[in-house]
Every structure is written in C-alpha cells, then in structure tokens.
Amino acid sequence: MNKIKTRALVLKGFRYSESSKIVTLFTRSCGKFSALIKGVRRQNSKLSGAFETFNLIEIIYDKNQKKELQKIFLAECINEFSALKNDLGKLALGYKILDYINSFNEEFDTNTELFDFTVKILELINSNCKMETEDVNILFLEKLSNYLGFHFSNSKNYFETFNINFAFNINEVYNSNFNYAVEKKSEYILKDELSKKQLIEIMENEIVCNLGIAKKLITSKI
C-alpha cells in the first residue's frame, strides 16, 4: 500500500450510488486522477462536504495507477471558496478554470507550480480584488500556456496577426505579494480593436492547437 498525503482541488464530481460519489481531483503531488468516495453522501459521513467542487482539501490516499479509481482514506477541507461560489460571475470563471485544468492535464501528470498557481488564482477570484473576470481569465491562460510548454509570445499565428503585446510580466505576478502584483501589472494592450472576449477565444484555440501538435509528436515516436 502506497499512502500519500497531498493537497487537492476538487475539479468535478457526480453521484455514483445512494451513498457514494466519484470525483476528479487535481493534486499537488500526483497530478489529476479520479477517486471513488464511498459513503460520502451519508449525513453522518466524516467526509461529507469535503468533496464539493472547488474545495481545496488535504487528502491521504492509496496511489495505484493501475486502478481507474483511487481510494481515499482521509480528507480535510482547507478552503471552500465560499465568496466565489456565491457570486455568479466569479462562479462562471471558476468553472472555466477548473475545466481548463481538467481538459489540458493528463492523469498523474504532476505539475506542482501549476497547482500552486491555480490555487492562487482561485484565492484571487474569491477575494475582494477589483480585477475584471476577463482579465483574470487572460492572466490564467497566459500562465497555463507556460506550464504546458509553450509561450504566446512565440506564436506565429494569431498573435502576430493581431499584434498583441502583453504589458504585464507574468513572472512578476507570481510572488509573495500576489494580489497587489496582479492588480498593478495585469493591464495589457490590444491593438486592431481586438476585444477581451476575442482574445480569450484566441488564447484557448492556441492552447488546444499546441497541445494537439505535441500529442501527435509524442504518438509518432511511440
């Protein structure tokens, strides 16, 4: 038995039976995986409430990559992100970020920096920061692209066409004074009247395109 203690974000979950639930977790130490939480839907369950979507939790589980569903022994909720869950705009952005993480990460692909940054972004959305949700979305996509192995500044497609220049330095954003740095350095310049919504769509398409090319290269070498 290989018991591991790690922090995790609950990406999604659904009812498996009258008393159990299957969840997808993004963990700091072991990447993304799914787990069967038996009895979690019972009122007297010690795990009740811990595995709600968005929750930052600390778990102890038995790692077995040969199994489709991992076994969780203990879980403790660290942050429920209640302010995010109670604001429709923040909630929509939060779901989008969790969807990015779920879609763009392979199972058991460990990325501690991406995990830490995702938690920071959710804490930012959950806070009283005055940044617009679209700015936070763009900030996250820019950082996500770096962690996935490419940079928008090197793109020879949309970004040259629209002559986009990011004025913030993403490396300066990720520091101990995160909220202040984001508020002061997240402004960017858009030329050719490109809207923030269009920019987000372009960034999403670029990530999908680059990941598709990378997967084809890996497959061709096998």
Image: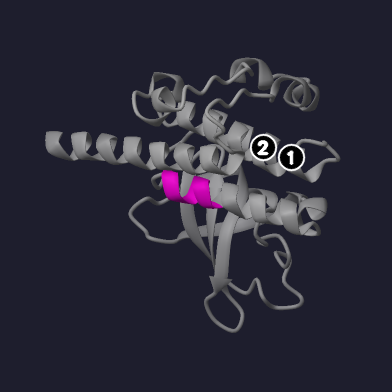
| Badge 2 density bin: few <14, some 14–19, many ≥20, Cα 10 Å | many
Judged by its main secondary structure, the magenta piece is helix
Q: Is residue 130 left or right of residue 63?
A: right
- The image quarter containing residue 194 is top right
Look at the image and give the residue range highlighted in magenta.
99-104
Q: Among all residues in the image, which is located at the extreme bottom?
A: 18
Secondary element at tag 2: helix
The location of residue 173, given as percent across then percent down, is 67, 21
Disc ID at residue 136: 2
Q: Is residue 135 shown to the viewer in this render? A: yes
Tell me the kind of residue under disc 1: Glu
Quarter of the picture holding the C terminus: top left
Secondary element at tag 1: loop
Q: Is residue 115 left or right of residue 219?
A: right
The location of residue 63, given as percent across then percent down, is 45, 49
Residue indicated by mark 1: 132
